[in-house]
Amino acid sequence: MPRDLDSMPITVNTKETLVTAFALFSLFFGAGNLILPPLLGHKSGGLWWLVALGFCASAVLIPILGIMAHAKLQGTIFDFGKKVSPSFSLVYALLIYCISIGLPSPRTAAVTHEMAIQPFFDSPALLTSVVYFSLVFLFVINRSKILNILGKLLTPAIILILFLIIGTAVFSYDFHFGTPLYQHPFSEGVIEGYQTFDAIGAVVVGGVIIISINLRKKEATYEEKKALIRRSALLAGLGLLIIYCGLILTGALMQGEFGATVSRTALLNGISSKTLGGTAHLFISILVSLACFTTAVGIVTGTADFVKYRFHDSQTAYTATALLGCILGITMGQFNVAYIIAVALPALMFIYPITIVLILLNIVPDKWASQKVFRAVVVTTFVFSVPDFLGSLGLAEAQSYLQGFVPLGTYSLGWVLPAGAVFTMANLLGKDQA
């Protein structure tokens, strides 16, 4: 009989929880997490809190639920979709890893070059990418040390610099806000939260955390590991929530300092200069480099872990995948940040809704998430995500036509109500048949 989680003697101490929480935070907090919130705040004005609510729904709540799902499953990304079918799960996993190493991972190198290298050195983006992903490869190969390095060394430095920027802005500027530039602030926040890749990141880096804990705590029981992951996820989620809201508020407070057409990276650089003064470039360079680097390490490690698992625990497969991921990172990392974000949008509008429903279905009790429920909800989500996918490809007329038939379609959330309705109906019909 399973032991009650609250009464059992858990051998999880505070230090282990903090190290794991810091590691989770650093794996999530990368390029998009740093450059997206300030511009959201800058464009939201007095409605910054509504934008923050939408952004945190897709960039904090869903990712943390993804880690909770990993705590329950304690397997790989393959387990997220296996109730739909093994073939679907394998294709889904491969798509997730291809997107991850092809877009968000290289984007971390591009952001590092634009914000941490270019202001100091007149060197090409190729050189930055080569050095950057060579270091990533070294970290990924030293697999067993990742959790300690991320949790004890890199994350505290990231958090300290972020609090310096946010704290200075909050205490230096009056709480007077400009006119919002968004028509639908909440949904704008949700969709921009997609660009963090954190829901996808949850199913990728959650596996990294599981394997790292297994390497460190080989004798720990299922319930002990579950408790450690859950507590760490809640702490990491709280940290992300505070940082995101702080960065969005900072962008809103400083709206009058920058023009309406300011870019994401220019805005972050400008905010840093106004809050940290003469040391801004040094601090922002360290912050960007650390935040981006930890995410790239997590993505490449997660991809290599999965391939290793599929090839019967082959270390050769792990090393080859890590090398391939870093080579792809070097290739794509030479492009500028705006280009990579634009290229990523169609992939996100296609895979993100499916990822969200898989996370939610794996969180709910098993009695509400049968194989039939999984299949019905995933298929429904896929169908009702088509208009947003077409819009991201530039087919605006087709998108507008289809959105007219779907509730919330104009907010690019047309899949939400149909997926919820099918989930409810499938469960009610399942009970009637039983």
Image (cartoon, rainbow, N blue to C red):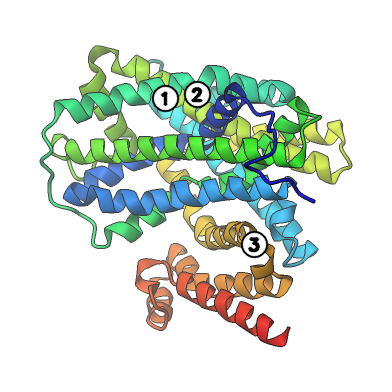
Give the left or right position of residue 146, taking residue 395 as reference: right
* Amino acid at the residue labelled 1: Ile
157 above or below 390? Answer: above
Mark 3 closeness class: few <14, some 14–19, many ≥20 residues within 10 Å:
few
Name the residue rendered at 58%, 81% in the picture. Answer: 425
Q: Nearer the viewer, residue 365 or 345?
A: 365
Residue that carries the numbered disc 2 in the rendered image: 155
Name the residue rendered at 36%, 26% in the picture. Answer: 162
Question: How much space separates mark 3 and mark 2, taking CA atoms?
Answer: 33 Å
Instruction: Pick whichever of labels 1 and 3 is earlier in the sequence.
Output: 1
Dividing the image into 4 quarters, which one contains the C terminus?
bottom right
Q: Nearer the viewer, residue 173 or 396?
A: 173
Residue that carries the numbered disc 3 in the rendered image: 365
Give the left or right position of residue 146, taking residue 120 as reference: right
Q: Tell me residue 417's x, y (percent).
A: 46, 74
Judged by depth in the image, the label closer to the viewer, 1 or 3, is: 3
295 above or below 184? Answer: above
Query: Are the residues tagged 1 and 2 within 8 Å (C-beta)?
Result: yes
* Amino acid at the residue labelled 3: Pro
* Amino acid at the residue labelled 2: Thr
Question: How much space separates mark 1 and mark 2, taking CA atoms?
Answer: 6 Å
Judged by depth in the image, the label closer to the viewer, 3 or 2, is: 3
Question: How much space separates mark 1 and mark 3, taking CA atoms?
Answer: 35 Å
